[in-house]
Amino acid sequence: MRSIVYIFAGVLALATEASVRFTSPAWRPDIGLSAPILADSEAMPFEMPKAQSFLVAGEKGERRLEDRFDTFDLWLGRTLCGRWCDTSGNTFFLAKLATRPPSDPPGTVRTRTEFSAMDAKTPIDPHNLDACTEAAHSASPVDLSRPVRPRRSQRRNMTGLFALPSTNAQTFAAIFRPRSPERMESPDWYMAVLVAADGEPLDEAFRRFDEDFLDNVSIPAARARPRTPAASNPVQISAVTGSSNGNAFEKTEACLLREAVRLNVANYDNWHFVAAGDVTVIDNLDLASRGTFIPSLTNSLPLLRSAYAACVPAAIDTTGQIAVVRVFATREEYLAYVGLEHKWTAALWDTLHRELVLYLPPDDTQGLLQTVWHEAFHQYLAYAAALVTAAPWFNEGHAELFEHSHLDRDGKVVFDMDQIAATYVNQHAEELADILPEIFRLGYEDFYSGTQEDIAARYRLAWSLAYFLEIGAPKIRFQPFANLRRDYVKALVETRSPEQAGRITLEGDFCKQLIAAWLNFWRKQ
């Protein structure tokens, strides 16, 4: 993600004459400063930390998924407050140096609860310049040298100010401690870094950074600070620490995740945060777009997630798992975040960062909502199967099942017939029945191989299997396939292998009975 910013900066600099400018200062409560930012800039949110999953047992034998993260990545998420890139390619970073970097060996992973308890015990003493410098060096996007006093180190708005030279001539960095008008307040140290675009007049860029930013940073008196509206879903953190068992730990992890998501965009003027039940959404849509799309998303997704669980029961305890959704206003921003390898997508479930990412097209909002329901099923199934990837016929088939559905007036999910897929399956039912055993064993590489028509045919067949299990199978006498989906997901968790799970649940006479029942159902459609 960081490399994209620098490439973007370099390209734009060639096309236009750069000029660093800063906005008027504005109160930013989550940073604790009244501060300017780059003028004509776009917010560039940082990626959420990469998760590593562990299946842990509770006191009563129940199993749950526990996400752990590199402690340095979690610290960076707390320390880096924002990144902005202007239209000329200049990039500006702001950080709050409140706690020391983790002392863990590189690669140490912890839960958010464990890290939060550890981080709270390592506040930086504002009088310890070495500790401030260590934190600044750790958080900086570029290599920095030891602090030096700048030419104008004594300023009315500062109690401390040091420049941090860099081997990169385009970089200007400083750590500073603003003066507080409140006697009881002991302000933290902060770091600001400006990476000027290629071709930028560096003397002028430094002057702007020095005079327009550093001279205008302040901490206003409490009575003069603008009132900040309360968050839509205030986060209450309990006193639970460590990887304890039970719902208290899971709820604490969920609260900490929700707060981390909020802080990921809290300091950007054009980003918004909303939480609705077990769904958390952040977006940078304009007022008109978010006024219609975000309520549709937050109203429908909790209902869909309940329907996912009823359709495909989880094999582990998923209490406390929340769905994180990031919505970009434009395709360009979306691709800059997810990477050009996903340029064929409009939405995707990012397993590594535990978020559903999408962008809002200028038209067909309802079509995007259907796509979200598809991707959100992948999100649900990942947690339900302890992040063991299900076979594509099961994973894509049920995602297609929910994509072709709607909510009735009572909020109940109604599964619609995909007419194109249904016609295809009905016309080729006999020959498709012959290849179903192979489809059950198919991996993702083979599922996505061939022409676009080949891939579309497999999607249609996968949908027809999921539709049969949901609509047709319950009508069969004695319901012999009632537990198939539950047993399959359970086998996924037990074996950690979609191939072995398929052999356990879809072999022998049972598989023959399933294919015969599927064939009988689709012959009649």
Image (cartoon, grey):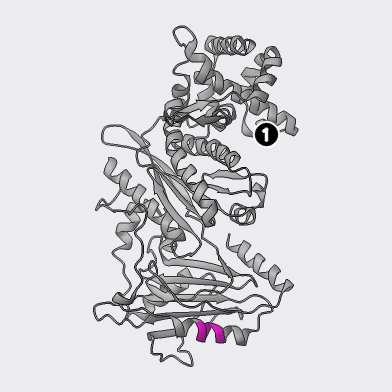
The spot of residue 116 in percent (x, y) is 33, 57
Q: Is residue 210 magenta?
A: yes
How many labels sit on residues?
1
Q: Nearer the viewer, residue 27 or 377?
A: 27
Q: Is residue 164 magenta?
A: no
Looking at the rendered structure, the secondary structure element under dot 1 is: loop
The spot of residue 381 in percent (x, y) is 48, 34
Task: Tell me the kind of residue under disc 1.
Answer: Tyr
User: Would residue 424 appear left or right of 91 to someone viewing this image?
Assistant: right
What type of secondary structure mainly makes up the magenta span? Answer: helix
Q: Which residues are magenta?
A: 207-212
Task: State which quarter of the image contains the C terminus.
Answer: top right
Above or below: residue 273 compared with residue 251: below
Above or below: residue 146 compared with residue 3: below
Mark 1 sits on what residue?
448
Q: Nearer the viewer, residue 155 or 394?
A: 155
Q: Nearer the viewer, residue 448 or 13?
A: 13
Above or below: residue 149 compared with residue 78: below
From this viewpoint, is residue 331 visible?
yes
x 69%, y 31%: residue? 455
From this viewpoint, is residue 146 visible?
no
The spot of residue 413 in percent (x, y) is 47, 28
Q: Residue furthest top?
A: 477
Q: Nearer the viewer, residue 88 or 290?
A: 290
